[in-house]
Amino acid sequence: MGKPTESNESLTVRDERTGKTYTIPIVNNTIQATAFKQIKAQPKPGEREENETERGLRVADRGFMNTAVIESTITYIDGDNGILRYRGYPIEQLAESSSFLEVAYLLIYGALPSTRQFDLFEHEVMTHSIAHVDTEGFFHSFRYDAHPMAILTSAFAALGSYYAEANPSLQGQALFTKSDPASLANMDKQIYRLIGKATTLAAMAYRVRQGRDFVVPPVGMSYTESFLYQLDHLGEGDYRPNPVLSKALDVLFLLHADHELNASATTVLQTGSSLVDPYSAISTGCASLYGPLHGGANEAVIRMLISIGKPENVPAFLEAVKRREKVLSGFGHRVYKTSDPRSFIVRRTADEVFKVTGKDELLETAMKLHDMALKDDYFVSRKLAPNVDFWSGLIYRAMGFPLDFFPVLFAVPRVVGWLAHWRQMMLQPGGVKIWRPRQIYLGAGKREYVPIDKRKEEGGKEPSKVLHTGQGKRTQLATFKGKTKL
Ligand SMILES: CC(C)(COP(=O)(O)OP(=O)(O)OC[C@H]1O[C@@H](n2cnc3c(N)ncnc32)[C@H](O)[C@@H]1OP(=O)(O)O)[C@@H](O)C(=O)NCCC(=O)NCCS
């Protein structure tokens, strides 16, 4: 956003409470929220003291609808025109000609690599893929039906415990913000480890539920080939994943590598702003991505399609969406208000995959849903178009992945984007400022503590009484010291 003093454009604001006029600089079409703090007034008679009116105007933005929280050179999205560029390169060109690891280099370091640079990066990432043998016990500690995203989220945090040299709590808070060669090399090492081990941890989360032994990451395979190998290899000699599937996964990984300041990247920055280690920060990004409004959407799309069933049920389903009884998963986006450019590439990739796997039985239902929604005024008027998740789930299903593994297939490549944003923030000029937003306090004013025997019950302000899992009928009917248990 630059220094406000360099600006010759400005916004003039008149505070009608005081009659005072303020000039707020505009730089890069942006005003600083802190500039509004100078706009102060005396509280109106009877006004709540918690408004802090005399301490300056606050800026509210529930859900970050129009707030820029960082200067970035990584990804550009023009939501109105359906444009996505990584470091200036259109996503369509990258999907056509580049590869996931090359794009990872581009996103993190800011330029497309030369052959030498790429070879070094690929070598480092691929040779940092083996997880410490003790992590195996960690994976075995989960319940048999644990969601793989719960496992992966915890695994990233647990991974950090193996690397004391990457922990600012132990090494000093400036560990990653110094920008000197030693600090940068240390940062790069954690980047190699996190990208290299993302597939390893994800494959372990997959295999532990299948009751399969873990696989040592192979040598000499591409990133996605290695991932498929780690998921599926059962001991056959010279096992090689299908090239169409590993290529399709590479394209999907490339498309999912970054998406500007979405919820999970913002979460990584929010967590990282306390200068915690990158493993903990990535783990929180993973948790954020797990939610059904974000990375869980590709799973939700398939569950929705299964619930719709046959194409003839689509009209009734859309009517239910319009009555707000259901959500059309895989449609709509906070930023894209025309179409998500990734959705076209995913749609083409789906056709490639279906050639080797056969068509998914839900494809026709998906196509009818897609076509009807795009012609329906409810969705058109709200600018709701398919997002990347609408088709990607069908590819994953055709490739035989279980539904709850879909968000993992999103999280693994997104580690790259999270790291790119985290690295950029750590190295930003002026250092890192902890992210501490404000709130609008609307709660009780100051009041005095009342002893329990003098209190009146406040209606509607008590926790629910819940059924205790594990306490079956017999336990509920049993007595303990003469009283029933509940
Ligand atoms: C992605 C998403 C969370 C964006 O939310 P948002 O920017 O806050 O958009 P809003 O919730 O304000 O939506 C605007 C309007 O469209 C409607 N809408 C948005 N997405 C919708 C969907 N998928 N199905 C039905 N209606 C939808 C909202 O109900 C709202 O209608 P209203 O103005 O009449 O109240 C939202 O579109 C969504 O939930 N999509 C489904 C989940 C999904 O696919 N997520 C993956 C994103 S990559």
Image (tube, rainbow, N blue to C red):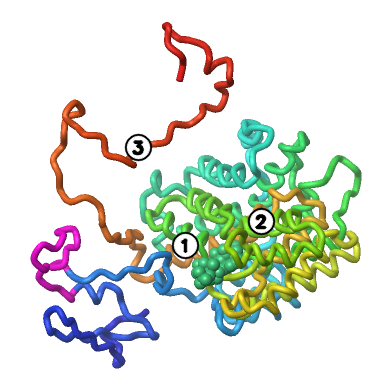
Residue drawn at point x = 23 percent, y = 85 percent: 13
Closest to the observer: 68 or 452?
452
Q: Amino acid at mark 2?
A: Ala
The residue located at (54%, 61%) in the rendering is 418
Q: Callout 3: few (<14), some (14-19), or many (20+) C-alpha neighbours within 10 Å?
A: few
Would residue 130 appear left or right of 448 to someone viewing this image?
Answer: right
Q: CA distance from mark 2 to mark 3?
A: 33 Å
Asked if residue 51 is among those painted magenta in the image, a careful observer would answer yes
- Which mark sits nearer the N-terminus, 2 or 3? 2
- Dot 2 corresponds to which residue? 300
Q: Quadrant of ligand 1?
A: bottom right
Extent of the magenta region: 38-55
Instruction: Name the spot of residue 372 as percent of width and height, x first.
Output: 73, 74
Q: Is residue 12 left or right of residue 285?
A: left
Residue 108 at least partly seen: no
Residue 189 screen position, x and y as percent: 56, 55
Residue tagged 3: 462
